[in-house]
Image (tube, rainbow, N blue to C red):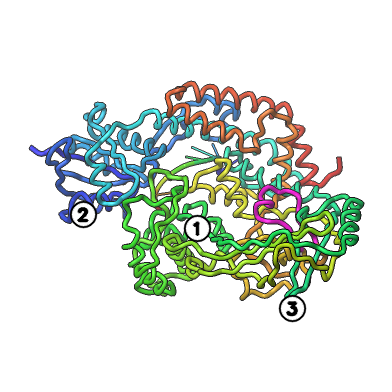
Amino acid sequence: MVTKVLCVAEKPSIAKAVANHLAGGQVQVASIQGNLYTKNYQFSYDFPTWGPCSVTMTSVAGHLLSTEFVAEYRRWGSCDPSALFEAPIETYVEDDKKAVAANIERQARYHQILYIWTDCDREGEAIGAEIRTVAAQGNQLFRQPDKTWRAHFSNIERAHIINAARGPVHLDEAQVNAVTSRIELDLRIGACFTRNLTNSVKAMLQRHAGAERTQAISYGSCQFPTLGFVVERYFRVRNFIPETFWSVKVMHQKDGIKVNFNWARTHLFDRMAVVILFERCLTARTARVTKVQTKPTSKWKPLPLTTVELQKCGSRFLRLDSQRVMHVAEQLYQKGWISYPRTETDKFDKGMDLRALVQKQTQGGAWAPFAQNLINRGFSQPREGRNDDKAHPPIHPVNFVMPTSLTQEEQRVHEFVVRRFLACCSQDAKGSKTEISILYGSETFNASGLVVLERNYLDVYPYDKWTSSQDLPNFREGEVFEPTEARMHEGETSPPGYLTEPELISLMDANGIGTDATMAEHIAKIKTREYAESRPRARQTRRDNEEEEYEPDEAAEPDAGGRGRARGRSRARAARGGRGGANGRGGGGGATTGVLEFIPTTLGVALVEGYENMGFEISLTKPFLRKEMELKMKAICEGRKTKADVVQETIEQYRGVYVQTQQRLDSLRAAVRKYVFQEDG
DNA sequence: GCAAGGTC
């Protein structure tokens, strides 16, 4: 008698792909009752471990079980919020998951082996355990430890999947425990602090505004640090004090070309020092060329596309906020045009046939000739980033679709994904860079020029800019000349801008706030909770000596006109919120760049400052607590801690914080009065 | 009416 194996994937797409690979064409598909997306695939397969088997492959759609407080604690008034630290909780199947759970429960009765094919990450491991729980409800057999197995795979290439099918392993209970700990802690802490915060502040707001605030004032380990980033930058902008600086500017005209030399010291904040150095230049009268160097340079093609990068690029180049980009990408994925859009991986698996994917893009679209050229001769293996989530490849096009059959927004996101992928498979751009240094008095000044020789990937990836500068005249080392113009320049540092969406995403990513799948939701949440607002950033013109920034082509957009305030900061400096750059004068125009910037509401500011002023050692509005949780989960995974340890010690920690927030509630109330009610003192 | 994490 053949063994019957029930395979369950984390999502329908994986079930379909795996079934097709294993079945080799001989597969029967059946719909399940009550769910449009989940299918059961039937086929035969000879697993080395179990011999010839009759296989049913199906899927869930993410987590199958939900966790909640038992009924008596669900009503807000039913208990003191702090009771939620220890209130009993239960796991159950949510209504919209019932059909999928019933399918697994029923199928379990007819099978002897449960083979889990969820993503190979922590959440996938936990989802696998949930599937096992539900299967065991249908068939007691699955309470036995050796009846449930798990496939290990990191992509859905045929050979890889077939290889995975040969080596089933056990579920990693440590990873499962790490996730169930997180779920329990997020629930208890989130619910407790949210109810308490709402009780403490809502009545105050209503008394003042007279209006009903129907919304809770929520606390969450991701949403609060997200708000914290926005507020921190807001204060840095508001508290910014401009500083005057001085510099020396040197221009020399030769062969009809004006060359601006940049002072090696950039600028100094001491006027007298600059006066002295400037006078030495004038006294010297002539400058001597100390270096003329021309060397090849290149601009690297981009890394394979991750979710975080897609969201950042969406904000910068496509004028779509992160939630919108993800929604559109999700649709493109479901229609089968692009690969799974939630991935942290920025390197392609060696075994992937990338040329075949490029080939598909030769069928049409503006990029078709470029793709054809890659096939003919230009193909180059993509660069490899350092991230691999072991669950999904970088985002890439999987099939050709005529752009005209897509909606406007889909076209923009799809075009970006295709162009990014083709850029990854191209050669770096090549150029020649000339650097000239002069010694003028005691000071060194530099000028550089770039000639782009081969555009390569740039031809398909207009989101990157790399253009030849004006040709430099010929200088020779040792040459002496009297500069055409030398003058002292006075400037002022300018404040950093408000936090933009790409910057916020970078900060969340760097600090482990949220995951690729949830970051956009956390950003949306601080908006719906009315903690922050976003608006398109006013357009600002670029400062002369601004380093290269990679901006979308804005040529088609109306110019702000005039001498708008210098953009004044490189992206990197802006992210650090460091000292601003040189500042010209004049206001920004009315036009916008489209990139969203975030400004906290008065409530958002009050919440952050109110909690900050409570003076806890570890701040609720900074990312450290979330980082700590991440470390604790890791400790569980590595067997250094148990779930019970982690849950207990974390709850004790927050219980302490809770008691203190109660004692120092005045701080929060004062902040609300100060910012929301705009009262003095 | 609460969280964050999956996913359709």
Is most of the magenta stretch helix, strand or loop?
Answer: loop
Badge 1: residue crowd in 10 Å (few <14, some 14–19, many ≥20)? many
Is A574 included in the stretch rendered in magenta? yes
Count of numbered labels shown in the rendering: 3
Task: Give the label, 2 or 3, closer to the camera.
Answer: 3
Badge 3: residue crowd in 10 Å (few <14, some 14–19, many ≥20)? few
Is A654 included in the stretch rendered in magenta? no
Q: Which mark is residue A256?
A: 3
Q: Are dots 2 and 3 in contact, CB under 8 Å?
A: no
Q: Is residue A479 left or right of residue A338?
A: right
Q: Secondary structure at mark 2?
A: strand
- Residue A39: x %, y % from top left: 26, 52
- Residue A381: x %, y % from top left: 39, 57
Badge 2: residue crowd in 10 Å (few <14, some 14–19, many ≥20)? some
Residue drawn at the location 48% of the way across and 33% of the way down: A182
Q: Which residue is mark 2?
A: A29
Q: Are marks 1 and 3 on the same chain?
A: yes
| Chain on which label 3 sits | A
Q: Which residue is mark 1?
A: A302
Q: Secondary structure at mark 3?
A: loop
What distance separates the C-alpha of mark 1 from that of mark 2? 40 Å
Residue at the left extreme of this rendering: A1
Q: Is residue A496 left or right of residue A307?
A: right
Is A394 located above or below residue A73 in the figure? below
Highlighted range, magenta = A566-583
Badge 3 amino acid: Gly
Is A139 located above or below residue A304 in the figure? above
Q: Secondary structure at mark 1?
A: loop
